[in-house]
Amino acid sequence: MSELTTWQHFIGGTWVEPASGQYVESTNPATREVLYRAARGNATDVARAVAAAREAFEDPRWRDLSQTRRGHLLRRLGDLIAENAEDLARMETRDNGKLLREMRGQLATLPEYYHYYAGLADKIHGDFIPTSDRQVLNYTAREPLGVVGAITPWNSPLTLTSSKLAPALCAGNTVVIKPSEYTSATVLRLAELALEAGFPPGAVNVVTGFGAEAGQALVDHRDLAKISFTGSTATGARIASATAGRFIGSTLELGGKSPNIVFGDANIPNAAMGVVAGIFAAAGQTCIAGSRVFAHRSVYDELLERVTERARTIRIGDPLDEKTELGPLAFEDQREKVAGYVDLGRGEGARVLTGGRATDGGGLGGWFYEPTVLVDVHNDMRVVREEIFGPVLAVMPFDSEEEVVRLANDTEYGLAAGVWTTSLSRAHRMAARLDAGTVWVNTYRAMSPMSPRQGFKTSGVGVEHGTETIREYTRLKSVWINTSEEPVADPFTMRS
């Protein structure tokens, strides 16, 4: 991939020029160099992609393919991702600034998404329902929905696209993907690998461009059976309204302001590393970031010292360098947003213990921001209540379990939470009482395609990962069959 590369839409198994003839430039956030141009899609391009997906859905090559064969295709796609892992990792690192070593870790596990759903493909089935009439057979069947639209963000394009694409294909749907305009290249390459794996043309389509143009057109398309979206809560609310009005489903993985809670009996060195990983990994650009830390007053000073000292020594620089620990923010507006929130926090009375400044990454010239720790904060401040999506941590003390449960749950979000304690009984109590779809105890950011993930409150609707997500991509049909050969009785004649 170079600055001379031009990516078209991927529709019906072929590269298609944008109807408008226009393109969007993508920039390396570490250096600000232009990497490539991607097609600027609009409603015409989306309509073509949905038509190709609909045609593929109805094509016997896909419609009549056995579930076991679908599984074989998914496994092959996972294998191809593994074979191309290094190239994909480097493409994504250059596209969004995520550390290469982190991307290599993601690419090492990403094939597991496809292998997992490959094994699940022929386990999708209905049930036999016993009824009071033994001569009437009732059974259920799970059927694919049709054309699924997937709108994915810029922070983890391959992983978050795969969490939608793998189960959608497993269930027998076809898919139109609209990736972020900032990070289109790896998703386009993924679609190309799907065709190479043997999926029929049109099973996987990608239309690139802006959300207000291509994304909105996809949400509004009448032939779409479902939308799966990962992104901001505000955009998710608009999508939920649009899909509800057409009575189609939506799976929405949205924002978070997750608490990371450290009790007095915790292993403090471990907790400190968990806090650092929870907020500074991926430069804080993750919906599950542990951006609010509550530390018991008895360990508050020690934890704060350890976290602050590590934050000060985090190595900022080129994400392609193996020694780098913190890369850039993904684009200029995101850095301005982060800087604006830190300035807002200062205005609200917060004190910056470390960080709080933009930097050029040691001369690279990109959109870097220092790891930042804020203290003298409370739950009513905007920097504590609103999602910043950057390397900014707010640390607060607490005195009792009751108090910290109240503080942790005092948020519109409910995506994730962390608990650090050596008390097994407290771990279970907290897991039950925290208003979050995922609760980690003595770890943070652990995940697997086998484990379902759901956001509570404004953090989302629906389930991703695990077997439960298959319900998001299928519809349930109930079938009744009269097995009796006796004449059907006249409904208006009274039976004795």
Image (cartoon, rainbow, N blue to C red):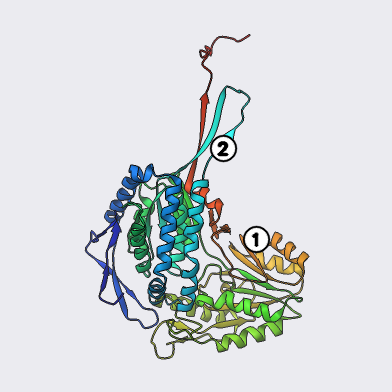
On-image quarter of the N terminus: bottom left
* In front of the other: 116 or 432: 116
Residue 22: x and y in percent read 24, 66
Q: Is residue 366 visible?
A: yes
Marker disc for residue 6: none
Left or right of residue 218: residue 408: right
Mark 2 or mark 1: whose residue is earlier in sequence: 2
On-image quarter of the C terminus: top right
Mark 1 sits on what residue? 435
Left or right of residue 78: residue 384: right
Q: As displayed, is residue 65 above or below residue 99?
A: above
Which residue is painted at 76% across and 80% down in the image?
298
Residue 420: x and y in percent read 70, 72
Q: Which amino acid type is marked by label 2?
A: Asp
Q: Which of marks 2 and 1 is in front?
A: 2
Q: As displayed, is residue 43 above or below residue 3?
A: above
Residue 303: x and y in percent read 68, 82
Element carrying mark 1: loop
* In front of the other: 200 or 40: 200
Mark 2 sits on what residue? 127
Which residue is painted at 61% across and 23% down in the image?
134
How packed is label 1: few (under 14 Cα within 10 Å), some, or many (20 or more)?
A: many
Q: Of all residues shown, which one is farthest toward the bottom?
A: 363
* In front of the other: 254 or 204: 204
